[in-house]
Image (spheres, coloured by chain):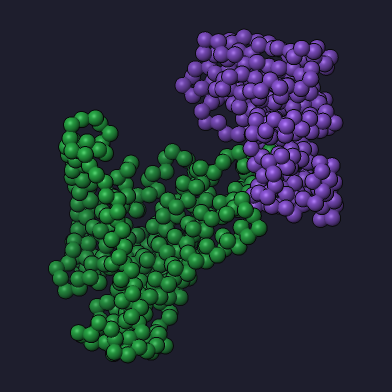
Chain colours: A green, B purple
Amino acid sequence: MRGWPLVAVLAYSLSVVDMAVILGPSTPPTLAVLSWQWLTDPNDMAQAKGSAAALCLMLLLGLLILSGRGVWWAIKKSYRYPSGIRKQGKPFKSRALLGIPVFIPGWLSLAILLLWSVAGGWFFPRLFPAALSLKSFNNADFEPMFTALWLGVATAMIALPLTLAWLEWGSRKHHGWLYAPLILPSLPIAAAQYHVLLTLNLDSTAVGVIWSHLTWTFPYMLLVLVGPYYSFDARYLCTAQALGHGRFQACLSVKWPMLIRPILAATAVGFAVSVAQYLPTLFSGGGRFATVTTEAVALSAGGNRRVLAVQSLLQTALPLCAFMLAIVLTAWYARNRQGLK
Amino acid sequence: MRTLSIKNLKLTKLDGTPLLGPLSFDIAPGEVMTLMGVSGVGKSTVLNWLIGAPQPMFTAAGEAWLCDTRIDLLPTEQKRIGILFQDDLLFPHFSVGDNLAYALPSETRGRKARQSAIEKVLTSAGLSSFYDRDPATLSGGQRARVSLLRALIAEPQALLMDEPFSKLDSTLRQQFRSFVYERITELKIPTLLVTHDAEDIPEGGNVLELHQVGGVVESVGNTASNLPSASSTWKQSNAG
């Protein structure tokens, strides 16, 4: 069970299209990009190839998981720790600090984006722009941001009651399958959803896009909420019910308000996940819904770094605002109640 | 008659091995029956069964009767049984007054009427200006008192207590214990108390001791040094 986060990362790297397209537009495509290109090709044969390639992606994931387990088994045999089995071998010194440098490129990228968005003229080989101006922001198109905003809000607001309902009334033991979209490559799933929506005549509709987003939003919200929810002291609900209130009433007035902090955090995460969706928005929306994410990927192919920087910053701003709102709302709700802080 | 009766309670673990039973006893109005036994013998399981808390690890068979109605099949909110736990479990997002208002039955209508009813209850316990207080700012003894007030303001027909005194220090314990027993006698509520501490047993109270015999719990009725009150009855039964 401890390997699942790695599987999720693996699935993501294997199937990510927007990252591959942005980072290497003219390099040979990855399997995911190839599959996506074929799937969006109007030619029927190309679409069949695309579906086959998507299946290959799943097989590849399976193979990699197996070889990963094999490597882990080999490591356990040759090192003393962390297998927990007493045997001869070299001690394995863990270097958890190795994780920190991973974040530095992220922060640097944000800094560069900020610089580009306010850059006047900036030419190689200067390290800083020649002039700073707000022209890019003044001329910016805010519509993709608003599209992403209402799509994200709608998705999060639908996913929240679903998540709470599942956690409260659903099976505690058998919920592993709900996390499947997180550990499977997203390309095959998004493509399959498009075909389903086509059959139902719901492609290119908001309902279709939101439904498609829910596939990833719901598991993430579940993931965030499941810890605090299952460790919530059951005696509170028992007490509330013993005082004469039905279970749903008790959840509404006692349990969920007491869980306000994780619930708001989960909603913010759900919103962020929806904003970040590229393939699902493209596929299910039939290209008709321009969000900051789809715009940013499209702009990355062009030469206008400033416009791209503005859209990317807007894309970053949305989840940031959601998380800040979650923090502010929690602080306000707990303003007179030490027990909730 | 406000009597709490348990008839032939049998508790079995999931794998089929019996845990407890058959157990039968009656508690008269105003009487406090103490359930004692070592840890793990099943005392809390009996309480959980009575209050209707989900217990996936055990199956229960038997009947519970209160005021001549069969309550073991009713959902928790309809049983009219109050419960006090080891921790006060005051709702942290409500004020003290709101905690009590949550328990006050809806028969009392109107904000003014409800507020004055709650103020009356608080004053009777020496907590008169506490309506708007944050529960987290109260001392342990005050919280315990509010918790009992909350349980009683809901007008329960019976009360269950799962080691409610164990987290209080000894002086507080005595004070709170007398406070609780006074209210119970005054309101004539049959009470089932689970505890490890023999000092918690009220004067002349009945004690039901659960002993583990060869893996199955049987009850051995045991009275305190004084004679039990005439209206109380209890039955002793061996593991079937």
Q: Residue at x 59, y 26 (%)?
A: B45
Q: Residue furthest left?
A: A28
Q: Is residue A35 visible?
A: no
Taking A307 as reference, is B27 above or below it?
A: above
In-front residue for pair A72/A46? A72
Quarter of the image with the C terminus of chain A in it: bottom right
* Left or right for B54, reference B147: left
Q: Position of residue A87 (x, y in %)?
A: 20, 30
* Left or right for A206, reference B237: left
* Left or right for B112, reference A299: right
Taking A212 as reference, is A136 above or below it?
A: below
Quarter of the image with the N terminus of chain A in it: top left
Q: Position of residue B110 (x, y in %)?
A: 83, 54
* Left or right for A241, reference A57: right
Q: Is residue A16 visible?
A: yes
Please tell me in which quadrant of the rendered image residue B61 appears.
top right
Q: Position of residue A339 (x, y in %)?
A: 61, 50
Taking A210 as reference, is A290 above or below it?
A: below
In-front residue for pair A29/B224? B224
Please tell me in which quadrant of the rendered image residue A234 appears.
top right
In-front residue for pair A1/B4? A1
